[in-house]
């Protein structure tokens, strides 16, 4: 039986330039939480979904540069589309962008919910085997009062029948696309996509939500988000190591850490022989259990002959994102008598940070000599050692 293809639509078209407690005027979806933009966290949460074929983000017309600055890199990401005057209109624009790809299912996610877990996402997908729509929700625990004028209680609701809706909300693509198209022809504005599905006569299931799956709306929510990340028991830290060595051959420069450094020789290798980036790539791959650089880029494959090693490093970063993880810190040690590394460290950090989409403060690069001992001491080649600390979802 063919597995169903899944598309994700992230709604990030809100202007949201409310001044925060720290004076920031950035829209909430682009503000940082634990050093990473909210929208980037939200998108990363879905890159590990099995059978994900396409992900499109609907953005505000004024936010193209902000979105580009996220430096998201995954072959399944479609170019962002500009949203409409309302959330409902924005979702329709996203559905139109996905329609040519003909996904079986679509998950519609609020950009300001960065903590959707693979458990919640998987439960929504599973419910679509029996229902046309599904959403995660949390049962209401507070007593709910009804008032017609906002001053006097007129009724007490039966809270056993009340649920607070979350996202992602999942649907069979053709049916929700048709429902949205029909809804766009009437004046009524719906509060969420599940309400449109209900109005269209589709059956919508409720699955168990997650109390940490919060929607960041008010300034205080950023504090709560930081607390969730700092105490997130569903994540674990893994450490990988890498080691690489390349000999010298006749030439006039070496590539190290993505920087071309003039020298009396060059490093010999199938690609650009960047020993530092090779060790670092292996360290990241090791941390997430994805083998080594040779598995992903075999030296026997001629397409990688002379390739820039930033290609390999970027691929490792994409695999981390697909696993729902994040890079905590990287540490590289380069062993050689020459050339001098110190003057180029800042440039190396900048290139690595740009390639992986992380802060330079998470990258350490050190250099040492072997005190003229061994092949490095005889200036026959260069060695690099690296370690990578990566936080990924726990898989007990």
Image (tube, rainbow, N blue to C red):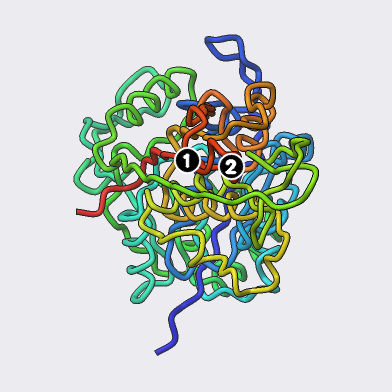
Q: Is residue 260 left or right of residue 310?
A: right
**First in sequence: mark 2 vs mark 1:** 2
Element under disc 1: helix
The quarter in which the N terminus is drawn is: bottom left
Residue drawn at x 66%, y 55% as measured from the top left: 268
CB contact under 8 Å: marks 2 and 1: no
> For the residues carrying marks 2 and 1, which lies nearer the camera in this image?
1
Where's residue 350, x and y in %?
Answer: 66, 30
Q: Residue 292 carries which label?
A: none
Secondary structure of the residue carrying tag 2 is: helix
Against 392, residue 298 (above or below) is: below
The residues tagged by marks 2 and 1 sit, at their Cα atoms, a distance apart of 34 Å
- 85 vs 128, nearest the viewer: 128
Image location (x, y in percent) of residue 359 = 57, 28
Where does label 1 land, which residue?
374
| Residue 253 visible in the picture | yes
Q: Position of residue 344 (x, y in %)?
A: 68, 27
Residue 356, label in figure = 2
* Crowd class of label 2 (few under 14; some 14 to 19; many from 20; radius 10 Å): many
* Quadrant in which residue 148 is drawn: top left
């Amino acid at each position: 039986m063919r597995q169903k293809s899944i598309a994700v639509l992230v709604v990030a078209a809100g202007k949201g330039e409310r001044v925060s407690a720290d004076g920031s005027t950035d829209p909430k979806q682009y503000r940082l939480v634990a050093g990473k933009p909210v929208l980037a966290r939200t998108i990363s949460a879905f890159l590990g979904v099995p059978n994900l074929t396409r992900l499109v983000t609907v953005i505000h017309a004024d936010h193209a540069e902000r979105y580009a600055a996220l430096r998201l890199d995954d072959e399944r990401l479609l170019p962002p589309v500009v949203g409409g005057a309302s959330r409902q209109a924005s979702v329709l624009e996203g559905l139109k962008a996905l329609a040519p790809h003909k996904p079986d299912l679509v998950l519609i996610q609020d950009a300001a919910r960065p903590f959707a877990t693979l458990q919640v996402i998987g439960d929504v997908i599973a419910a679509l085997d029996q229902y046309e729509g599904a959403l995660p929700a949390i049962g209401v625990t507070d007593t709910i009062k009804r008032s017609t004028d906002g001053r006097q209680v007129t009724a007490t609701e039966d809270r056993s029948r009340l649920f607070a809706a979350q996202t992602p909300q999942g649907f069979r693509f053709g049916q929700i696309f048709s429902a949205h198209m029909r809804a766009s022809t009437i004046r009524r504005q719906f509060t969420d996509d599940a309400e449109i599905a209900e109005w269209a006569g589709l059956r919508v299931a409720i699955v168990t939500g997650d109390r940490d799956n919060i929607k960041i709306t008010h300034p205080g929510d950023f504090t709560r988000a930081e607390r969730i990340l700092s105490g997130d028991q569903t994540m674990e830290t893994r450490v990988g190591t890498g080691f690489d060595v390349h000999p010298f051959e006749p030439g006039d420069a070496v590539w190290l850490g993505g920087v071309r450094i003039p020298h009396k020789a060059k490093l010999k290798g199938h690609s650009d022989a960047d020993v530092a980036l090779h060790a670092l790539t292996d360290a990241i791959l090791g941390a997430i259990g994805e083998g080594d650089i040779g598995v992903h880029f075999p030296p026997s494959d001629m397409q990688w002959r002379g390739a820039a090693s930033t290609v390999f490093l970027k691929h490792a970063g994409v695999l981390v994102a697909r696993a729902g993880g994040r890079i905590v810190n990287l540490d590289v040690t380069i062993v050689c008598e020459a050339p001098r590394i110190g003057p180029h460290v800042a440039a190396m950090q900048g290139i690595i940070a740009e390639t992986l989409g992380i802060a330079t403060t998470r990258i350490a690069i050190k250099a040492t000599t072997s005190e003229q001992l061994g092949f490095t001491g005889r200036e026959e080649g260069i060695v690099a050692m690296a370690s990578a600390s990566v936080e990924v979802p726990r898989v007990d």
